[in-house]
Amino acid sequence: MDAQEEDRVLIDDDADEPFVSNTLGYPVTVADDALPLVQHFLRARGQAFVVLADEHRALAPIAARLSSDPLCMGVRAFKLGEARKRLATVERVHEAMLGLGAGRDTLVLGIGGGVASDLFGFAAATYMRGVPYAHVATSLVAMVDAAVGGKTGVDLRAGKNLVGTFSDPVAVFAHVDALQTLPFRHIREGLAEVVKTAVIEGGDFFEALETLAPHPFWRWPWSSIVTESVRVKMMVVADDREERGMRELLNLGHTFGHALETASGYRITHGVGVALGLRAASMLALRTRRFSQREYLRLLGTIALLGMPLQTSVDPDATFAAMRSDKKRRAGTLRFVLPRAIGDVEYGVQVPDRLVKAVLAQLQRSPDSVG
Ligand code: GLY
C-alpha cells in the first residue's frame, strides 16, 4: 500500500455508500453526491416546494438541478453571510415565499451553509406559524453542525443567535461534493466544529484528526469525517433536543467564540471564533486544574497544524462584555463547557470572572507576535 492509500484508510472512506440515519426522527443523509437522494425524497414526499438558496454562484447549478421537479413552485436566492443573519433578511425571505405562492402545505427546501440553515430554517419555522423544512448542506459547518439538530435563528446587534426556535427539519442532506468548490478559509470554518466534536468524542476520531492534520485537505476522507461528526452530534442531541443538559457539550469553545465574533463586529468569523474558543476553554480547564498540560498541548498542536489561529487582536474587555449577553448564562452567571481530557468534556461549569479575564488576556496577540 503506498503512502497515499495508507492515509485514505485512516478513517474508512466508503465513499460509494451514503450514510443515512433516523436517530433524530428525520433522515440525515451524508453522500458525496446527495442530489439524487434529495430528488428521490422530494418525489416520495409528493409535496409542492419552494427552493431558498444562498446566492453564492457555486450553488446555482445545485438549485437549478433541484428545482427541475414539476412540484417546484420557484427558486429564490439571497445574499447571506453572518452580517445578514438578521430579522430584516427573514422578512425578505417571507415576502419572497409569499410571492412564490407558498402556503401552509408548502415544503421549504433550503440550500447553503450554516447561515442558510439557521436563517431559512427560522423563516420556515415562523412562516404562517410554521411550514416543513428540509436542508441541503453545502458547507462543512452546515454538514457537521448547523443543519443537524433543529436549531434555527438569527442574530441581534447584542449577540449571536439571540432569536430562534428549536424546529426539527423533515430531512437533512450533506452534499459532500460541494466541499470541493470551497476555498480553504471556508473549510477551516467547519474544521473548528469538527475538532470540537472530536474533542467531545475522543478516541479514534481525535486520533484520526491528529494523523490527517498535516495532510492537504484534498486527501482527507471527507464523507467519513462528516459522517463521524454527524453521528456524534445526533447522539448528543437525541437525548436533549432543547438543550436542557448535555446538548450544552456542543457549545465547547462557543462561549468565548461567540463573544469574540460579537466583540470584533463579525470581523472574526464563526470558525475562527470557535478555534480561538477551543484554545480559551482549554486554558480555562488548565487554570482550574481539569485538563493536563499534555492533553492541552495535543489539542493546541492539532489546532495549529490545521492552520487555525491561536491568538487574536480582539480587545479582551470588549470580549468579556460581549460574554455578558451570552444566552447560555443562567441566573446571570456564565456557564462554560470545559475539557477534562480529550473524550471527556464537562458542561455547566461556573468559573470566577477573574480567571475568564486572565484567559482572554492570554489569548491576546502581543504586538510583536507573528501571524
Ligand atoms: N451548534 C450547537 C448545537 O446544535 O447545539
Image (cartoon, rainbow, N blue to C red):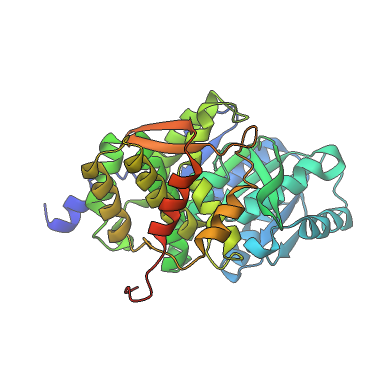
Residue 168, placed above or below residue 73: above
Question: Disc count in the image?
Answer: 0
- Left or right of residue 332: residue 277: left
Residue 359 location in percent, x, y? Answer: 41, 52
Res 334 quadrant in image: top right
Residue 58 image point, x, y percent: 56, 68
- Residue 215 visible in the displayed image: yes
| Vertical side of 248 occupied by 145: above or below | below
At x 87%, y 41%, the residue is: 128
Which is more toward the observer, 152 or 216? 152
Q: Where's residue 338, x and y in %?
A: 41, 38
Identified at 46% across, 46% down, the residue is 354
x then y, percent, for residue 180: 43, 63
Q: Residue at x 36, y 40 (%)?
A: 285
Q: Is residue 246 above or below residue 88?
A: above
Which image quadrant for residue 311?
bottom left
- Residue 76 against residue 43 in the figure, above or below: below
The quarter of the picture where the C terminus appears is: bottom left
Picture residue at 49% right of the left edge, 34% below the top: 350
Give the side of residue 238 with respect to residue 214, left or right: right
Q: Residue furthest left?
A: 1
- Judged from this view, the residue extending furthest toward the front is 354
Can you tell me which quadrant of the image ligand 1 is in? top right
Whether residue 223 appears in this view of the structure is no
Residue 144 falls left or right of residue 46: left
In front of the other: 267 or 143: 267
Q: In which quadrant of the rendered view does residue 80 lie?
A: bottom right
